[in-house]
Image (spheres, rainbow, N blue to C red):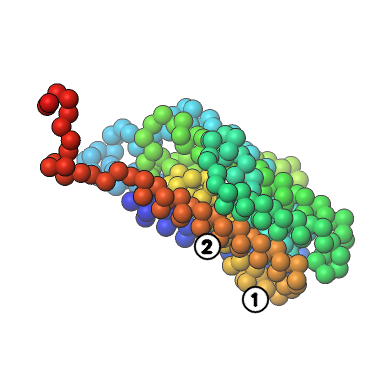
Amino acid sequence: MKLFLVLLNCFLLTVGQVGGPLLARTYFLHGGKRRWLSAWILTCGFPIMLLPLAVSYYSLAAKSKTTQSTGRFTLTRWLFATSAVLGTLLGLDSYLYSFGTSYLPVSVSSLLGSTQLAFTAVFAFLIVKQKFTPYTVNAVVLMTFGSAVLGFHMDGGVVPRGESVERYALGFFMTVAAAALHGFLMTALEYVHRKAGVPLTFDLVMQVQFVISMFAAVFCTVPMIINRDFQAMAKEAVEFDLGETKYYMTILLAAVALQLMIIGSIGLVFSSSSLFSGLVTSFLVPTQQVFAVIFLREGFDAEKGMALAMCLWGFASHLYGEHKAAATSDNKQPTPRNHGDQEDSPADV
């Protein structure tokens, strides 16, 4: 069951992380200008979780032959409160990410987002006392410097056409801030996981995910109402380069894909660890690069290639370190002795 959950969440994270940023960038490339709307798209897909929650609820009710049986909605007050706080921070993280995406190509923003592994590693060490190997440290350093290559090279070869260096720099630092906050959120979620005080079941994980996503959506909805973004959507749809229908389709598909990304990343924290979730996220960066070049026709120059190579090298280093540590742990396990090989105890003598 644990392996199934890990694979399922990896699949959801892959679909969401590859498709979501491409659709979000498409919104800005073809006339979209409202960043709070982009942040809202990142979080508003949480109602899709009502379907698996409903299926789980009624399947358990059928087994117990009553819809009044207890133990289905197992969120404690502490879990609900911490999930609400984490959800609010996720809403802020969504705004930082959407702000950066509006000024950066997908290939650049995805590589910068891969630095969340470095931030996750730091917070994991401080909060959950994660143990590190030289391979992990090597991965963190490589991926950090890989992203720094893009930050220091801000001439016309990297800055998108029509964007100023100042806006590119602002988008760069906002995206890095989003990666740092995301790394903290994943580690804090692992800490909540360890301190939950109740058995962690698949149903409980879905409930935590729903509360986090709901509060993130509420955080982004309030500014949307204040800025009258909902009323402005109709005018923006008419002026969208791809047409009104594709405007709403882009928003809908992006909301679904990005919600799958959130579900997958949170699910990996519960089924494995925050560090593994960051590893998978960083591993998906090359896939984002390929799809951005194919569908959005973004360029791929030497700087992006160097940054990509360093990120892949860092991931491979950490993966090898984990494999080596697991093999060493298996070799250290004591071999059971046969009954005939047991030495006589002092009592037997």
Using the image, tell me which numbered label, if any, was put on residue 294. 1
Q: Residue at x 87, y 55 (%)?
A: 166
Mark 1 closeness class: few <14, some 14–19, many ≥20 residues within 10 Å: few
Residue 154 percent coordinates (x, y)? 84, 61
Residue 101 percent coordinates (x, y)? 72, 57
Q: How many marks?
A: 2
Q: Residue at x 76, y 45 (%)?
A: 227
Quadrant including the C terminus: top left
Using the image, tell me which numbered label, if any, was put on residue 220. none
Three-letter residue code for mark 2: Val
Residue 10 percent coordinates (x, y)? 47, 57
Please say if 260 is above or below 345.
Answer: below
Residue beneath disc 2: 15
Q: Is residue 270 visible?
A: yes
Q: Does residue 330 appear to the left or right of 222 in the view shown?
A: left
Residue 170 percent coordinates (x, y)? 81, 52
Indicate the secondary structure of the residue bearing disc 2: helix
Please say if 348 is above or below 93.
Answer: above
Three-letter residue code for mark 1: Ile
